[in-house]
Structure formats: structure tokens, C-alpha cells
Amino acid sequence: MRSDIVKKGSTRAAHRSLFYAMGYTPEDLKKPLIGIVNAFNEIIPGHIHLRDIAQAAKLGVTAAGGTPMEFPAIGICDGIAMGHDGMKYPLPSRELIADSIEAVAVGHGFDGLVLIPNCDKIVPGMLMAAARLNIPAVVVSGGAMMAGRYDGKNISLSTIFEAAGLYEAGKITSQDLDDIENAGCPGCGSCSGMFTANTMNCMTEVLGMALPGNGTIPAAHTGARRMLAKKAGAAVMEMIKKDIKPRDILTAKAFENAIAVDMAIGGSSNTVLHLTAIAYEAGIELPLTLFEAMSAKTPYITKMSPSGNHYIQDLNEAGGMPAVMKELTKRELIHTDALTVEGTVAERLADAKITRSDVIRSVDDPYRNTGGIAILYGNLAPDSAVVKESAVKEEMLTFTGPAKVYDSEDEAIEAIIGKQVQDGDVVVIRYEGPKGGPGMKEMLNPTAVITGMGLKVALLTDGRFSGATQGACIGHISPEAADGGPIALIQNGDIIAIDIPGRKLDVKLTAEELDKRRSEWIKPAPKVTTGYLARYARLVSSGNTGAVLK
């Protein structure tokens, strides 16, 4: 066993003594040591209940003949960090999570891991660690929040952000806003729509690193979630016996499966960053051209919030990820021979079926014949830009207008609320990329306020957007402004042409004019010069390569 390095032989007497100090017995040390990586904290609604999940996972490990040992992982709530300098940290925290798990797992010689995340950056951070360490590992998440209820309708966190725009536009009262904020988030779990957290939990299941149901069983279904955690504990023990490791599962086929499902369910645009980063740790190149190729041939068959009126609880009732994957096999979009933490994809899909056709459509009757995410290129985004096409209204898929340029999210929000942005404008928010932010801020605030105010505008940024974002919001523009990308050269009034169906993003300037501006461009001083973010800015790669540290 890997753990023999910390528990066998005369030279490990002191090590054993330290284990005994914690109450572990000699019999415990004869068994595989399983790290239970628990992201529990008291600041993220998706994590507030993870002690229960961890306890169930430990019971599963113990019953299957292992010795569980719990240790923590950090987490940041993107919603609470939104709209202020705290949003500089969530994406960089992904790397801290992966690094800290690596440090603890290697430092203590664990034989396997049960990884317990739930929210936006915690899920990919743990998957990156699993791929990097390549020791048997199973992910079991905390599950999705139930939708809130207001005025007889289901609502979610995105509704609350948009309500702020409605209030600023004078369309609702302060009492309405108070009622909505009190109703929107009814309890524990990752926010209830197909936002980044739930998208990544679904991706984890599709990649094969979690058991069926991981992506969609609601957090409030405590019995089902605890049973899933017990099974995850047993599954990692079986992986140890069979010597199945994450890189046996995280193959090119697995990532193609994930991208196909991502396109079919209209997942968060952030999956482009996260899947690319996980693949990097697994030693697999995942070019953005693959996302575009998969989008071109994958039908969009679920319309989840924020794009539609269905929530994760509905998707679970409809058959969850197995039902979606089985439907996609009709177009030969799923590699059924891919390995999972428990058998093959084919075995997982054998009994899968759609039980609510209003939630999961047939591939023969999709919402659209192409996927939910589009990759754009042009003289404004030579290396790429990303948009959640499924959340863009038909009339905004092609759009041309004058630029309103802001060098930070704060400047843009002030201008939007101050009614300086008008219908027909293209809002450009720059110097918010991985290096320039630093940290590649997620910008649900400006997009939600725009939606709430009913403005017909587009928004471009070298930062990124929440999975809850809707509208003509194009992010991850690469190269970013801090690297001298063309977005740094845009001036107020420049005409920007967006053609999402044509996959084009251009500013109507000649190459000569862009070259002239580039020669005159002066790189701004870093926004942060000390601490972790300063180090992160020096090491982080571009958004089009996953914003990983190199």
C-alpha cells in the first residue's frame, strides 16, 4: 500500500505513535488510509451541510475495509464575493485547493481519496488535484439547492441579482426586492440553476469521476445524498483493489463526453476554463477548437435556468445525467466504452431513460441543433472568446454598436446604474483577465443589472461571467488587456461587430490603426503588488489555456 511509507517498519515507530495519539489502532493502520477531503465551511450555502456528507463517506470507507481520515479544503462563495475585490480570489483559489490537497495527500501517504466539494472553483480544484496525484479517488458533491418560490414561480440567485437592476430602473419597490431576496435561496446546496457549480458537478459525473446522481440529486434529498456518499466511500476501496486511478478515467474520450453533455445542457461558460485546466493536470491537450467542433454537432436538449425555467431538481426528476447521455448516444456523441469510478459508461447507461420529456428533449426535437457554448474569434479576440450562446436572445446573436470602454468592473457598474449606458451600446470591461484583474473576475453584477434594467446592450470582457449570466455577454477574450491584447486598444465609440452564429468578434478598425494604437499603448501598473494575487498574476496563463499556473 502507498500508506506503508508512513506506517511500516521500525523506522516508522514514531509515525505510528503519532497515529495512536489520535486514537487510531494498530488494526486501523493495517488497512488502506483514505483521505476524506471535506470542503465544509460556514460561509458557502453549498458547503454548510458537508459534514453530513463526509460522515456518510467515512461510514462507506469503513464498511468496505478502509480507515478514513478527514482533512479540509478551502472554498469561496462566488455569490458573496461578487461585485467587489473579493471576486479577484475565487479563480485563483482553484489552484490553492489543488495544491493544498496535493501537499496533504502526498505528505501523509494516502492510498485513496474521497473528495467532497460542491461549488464553483472547489469542484474543478479537487478534480485537478485528483488528476495530478493520480491515486484512486472518487468525488461526491453536496448537491444542488432547491429553487426558491416567489409570486407563484420558481426563482434562483440570478433572479435576485436581476431584481437589483429592476429596482434601479424603478420597476419594483424596495419591499419587492426584500421579498425576493428572502425567497431566492431557501436552504443548503449549490445555487439551483445550471450555473457553474451545478454544471461542474454534472461534468464530474459525466467524466466518470463520480457516481450517477452526483450532478443532480438535490442537497435537500438528504437520504439520497448520504447513500451516494456511502457508495462513494465503498467505490474508492474497490478502485484501490483494482488499481484504477484518475488518469485511467480522465481520458480524451471522457473529456469529449463531458464537452458533448456540456453543450447539450447549456452549461456555464466557465466549464471551458475548468475542463481545460483539469485536462492539463491529466496530461491531455484540450484545444478550444474541440469545444467548437462538439458544439457544431451536439443538439441543445435542456433549457435550464438562467436560459429557461427548469432547475436542477427538474433535471434530476427527468433522469439526470444518465438520461442526457443516453439520449446523446443516438447521435453517437458519447463514448460508451469510457471508464468510470464504477464500471463503464455503457453499464451506467443500461437502464437510463428520460422520465420528463418537458425537461430533457429528444435529439430529434432539440431547442437548437447546436450546443450551448460558442467560441468566437476575430481581430478583437485572436486567441478566442467564449459566450453562452444558449442564454442569448435571438435578436442579440448578431449585434453591432459603439464601444463604451471601462478599465474595471466597478467603473462599468457605476456607469450602468448611472444610466450612462444606452440601448445599442457595447460595454467593454477590460484589465479584468487572469493577469490584469488579477484573478479574472466573474461579472454577474453588471450583466444582471443590465438584464434587470431591460437594456439592449452587449458586454465584452477579458474577465469571465457567472453561469447565472444571460444575454450577449462575451468573456475570456484572449489575449487579455494586460498582455496587450486588442481589447486594450479599444476606444470609446469604436464600432464592434458581434456575430455569434458566424463565430466572429471584431472591432471595425484597420490592421494599420490597431498597429498604431499598439505602438502607443502603455501597460498599466499591476493592480496588486503583494501577496498571493501578485504571485498568481506572474504565473497564470491566458484564459484560452484554462488560466492555469505555469
Image (spheres, helix red, strand yellow):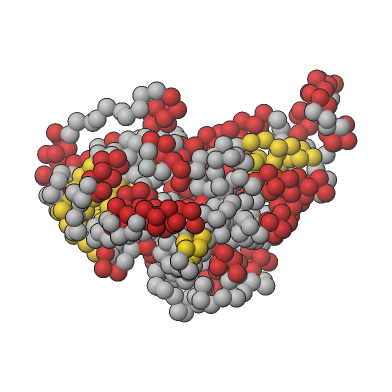
Percent coordinates x, y for residue 375 in the rendering: 35, 57
Q: Nearer the viewer, residue 245 or 39?
A: 39
Task: Please indicate whether residue 142 sits to the left or right of residue 5 in the image.
Answer: left
Query: Which residue occupies the extreme front position in the image?
Result: 175
User: Is residue 365 in view?
Assistant: yes
Residue at the image point whose x is 80% and y is 20% from the top: 14
Residue at the image point whose x is 34% and y is 44% from the top: 463
Task: Please indicate whether residue 155 sits to the left or right of residue 11 in the image.
Answer: left
Q: Quadrant of residue 401?
A: bottom left
Task: Please indicate whether residue 49 sits to the left or right of residue 235 in the image.
Answer: left
Percent coordinates x, y for residue 140 in the rendering: 65, 51
Q: Quadrant of the C terminus?
A: top left
User: Is residue 198 in view?
Assistant: no
Percent coordinates x, y for residue 280 in the rendering: 49, 44
Residue at the image point whose x is 70% and y is 30% from the top: 108
Q: Quadrant of residue 51?
A: top right
Percent coordinates x, y for residue 251 in the rendering: 57, 53
Task: Please indicate whether residue 475 sits to the left or right of residue 281 in the image.
Answer: left
Q: Quadrant of the N terminus?
A: top right
Q: Nearer the viewer, residue 371 or 9?
A: 371
Residue at the image point whose x is 58% and y is 43% from the top: 126
388 w.r.t. 529: above or below: below
Query: Which residue occupies the extreme right position in the image?
Result: 27
Number of marks drawn:
0
